[in-house]
Amino acid sequence: MRSFGSALALGCVLVACGGKAVVDGTAPGEGGAGAGGASTTTTTTTTTTHGGGMGGGPLGITLSDIVVGIDCMPVVPADPVHVSFTGSYDNGSSVAVSATIVGARLSLGGPPSTLDWTFAVSPASLTVPASSFVQGYHSKVDGSGSGSGLPCNFCSSPAALIDIDYLVDGQYSLTASGSGLVGCAL
């Protein structure tokens, strides 16, 4: 099995910047708060999700530096997908806020054929001190992925979408998203 680094060197990457979710200190439903690929094409996806932190101030989450690698050679493992991203966490409240990643999804393709690939992320939780900005590097846990098809069948997919689901302070949910181009090592 190839290492993640050699998969990147072979050009099977998705690089994306974009997507922001804001938790604004309200209960769920009460209001609240670009990706670039290896070519010059750029798209941006922004998701705003309702929710709130215990401190009453906003927690902003932005995903950037998203890298997706699909290892399709020479032997394709059961889980050939590699994912990493940087989460930027901006806590505007006067108390520390915890954020736990409770779900992660990669979507490839488009009608009539799509692939939804779920996976675990490490580290899965962090605490953002009061009135602080923290960045954290996250990566997919190798072998944790599964989905509705074979990722290597989606190498010609024009775009990918990544959704990261968070639980804030153990009670408020939000999703941060980013999108971009996809390529594979064949």
Image: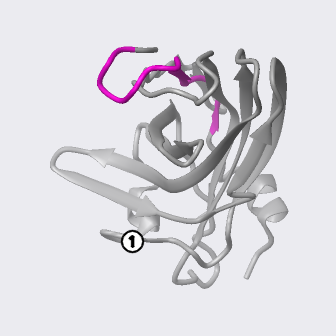
At 81% from the left and 54% from the top, the residue drawn is 9
Residue 85 picture location, percent across and down: 70, 43
Viewer-nearest residue: 180 or 62: 62
At 76% from the left and 54% from the top, the residue drawn is 8
At 40% from the left and 24% from the top, the residue drawn is 50
Instruction: Classify residue 149 as left or right of residue 138.
Output: left
Instruction: Classify residue 83 as left or right of residue 43.
Output: right
- Is 157 rendered above or below residue 72? above
Which quadrant of the figure has residue 185? bottom right
Which quadrant of the figure has residue 132? top right
Q: Which residue is mark 1?
A: 150
Is residue 89 part of the magenta span, yes or no? no
Which quarter of the rendering shows the C terminus? Answer: bottom right
Instruction: Classify residue 11 as left or right of residue 77.
Output: right
At 76% from the left and 47% from the top, the residue drawn is 126
Q: Which residues are magenta?
A: 15-31
Q: Amino acid at mark 1?
A: Leu
Overall secondary structure of the magenta section = loop
Which quadrant of the figure has residue 128? top right
Residue 170 picture location, percent across and down: 55, 49
Is residue 20 part of the magenta span, yes or no? yes
Residue 97 picture location, percent across and down: 70, 35
Viewer-nearest residue: 160 or 29: 29
